[in-house]
Image: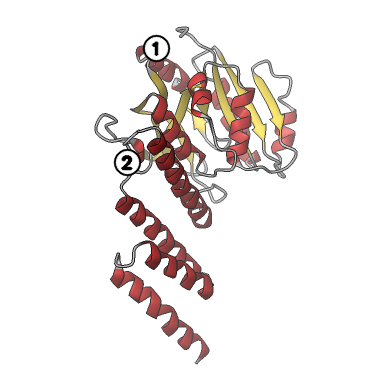
Amino acid sequence: MNKAPLVSIIMASYNNGQYLNAAIESALSQSYDNLEIIIVDDGSTDGSIATLHSLEHHPRIRIDYNRQNRGVGFTKRKCVENATGEICAILDSDDALTEKAIESFVRVYNENPDAVMVVGGFEYYDERMEEPIRRKWFRFDIEEKSILEHGYAFGWDTFRKDAYEQAGGYDAGQTAEDQDLYFKMEEIGRVIFIEEYLYKYRQHDRGISKINNRLDVRYDHLRAVESAQERRRRNGDDRVMTEPELSKEWEDYYLRCCMYAFERRAYADSYRRLWKSFRVRPYGKLFLKLNLLVHPVKFWRRQTS
């Protein structure tokens, strides 16, 4: 690899108009010079389009638009298809990078030519992005346990584009597209997690991390796990979750859905999710399940008495 490779900063944009300029400015202010910024807007209906139109002639920015909202997996996949760099680095349109972020990651790739993906930590900020609230990175020994066996990973994602293409890239229909890609990249090469906090994650009410979105993402995550399990078994790769471990994950998902449906007074849906938790793991968390079975009835009687 070239010691100063072209890096493509990938940005899927959707209705983050008030944060978009800050995200782009953090990319343009990098200490590393050999980079391009690839933006695809996913049918925004706020001020994002006007901001992007004003940047269309910028020499380091390339912008594309989806004709309708297609979702994060589709849009990130389109971003990477439009990229020409050897390395791609993900930047969400409401977040930001520290000044030396790209420089630091290029150094890791140069020092580890066998790495197909390098994932860093990030700092949580409030909506104003003034002071970090906390730091987080994925503390994980790849030699002892695979990402799939662990069940998940997280961080600021960068990857070699040729390895990404070999792995099959983002699933266009996924909302847990990052987890799906971790599993795929691990199957073809070395994934490195580093304790460097170079990414600023903005927390706000419009983020994908609200509870209903989290449940959708969790469902897609478990589907990605199942796909990876099947793929690895076909290829003779024994780095998989055990069936009891996977059953526990599905049980936890259905119970969370059950409780969320009950909070919304969607009692039929709550019982349906509870029944599914019994089916995947009949005797797991039995005390909790029995309480969830009885409590909605008492609650309903109080409301109608």
Query: What x and y, as percent, mark residue 210?
Result: 51, 53
Q: Quadrant of residue 122?
A: top left
Q: Which residue is mark 2?
A: 149
Up/down of 226 relative to 303, above or below: above
The amino acid sitting under disc 2 is: Glu
Query: What x and y, as percent, mark residue 31?
Result: 49, 15
Secondary structure category for the residue under label 1: helix
Neighbour tally class for label 2: few under 14, some 14-19, many 20 plus, Cα within 10 Å:
some
Relative to residue 264, is residue 46 drawn left or right?
Answer: right
Up/down of 222 relative to 239, above or below: below
Q: Residue at x 67, y 22 (%)?
A: 62
Which of 235/223 is in front?
235
Mark yes or no: residue 154 visible: no
Up/down of 176 relative to 256, above or below: above
Which of 232/258 is in front?
232
Q: Residue at x 75, y 38 (%)?
A: 67
Secondary structure category for the residue under label 2: helix
Spot the residue most to the left. 144
Alpha carbon distance from label 2 to label 1: 28 Å
The first of marks 2 and 1 along the sequence is 1
Q: Which residue is mark 1?
A: 110
Query: What x and y, as percent, mark residue 40?
Result: 66, 32
Which of 97/152 is in front?
152
Neighbour tally class for label 1: few under 14, some 14-19, many 20 plus, Cα within 10 Å:
some
The mark total stands at 2
The amino acid sitting under disc 1 is: Asn
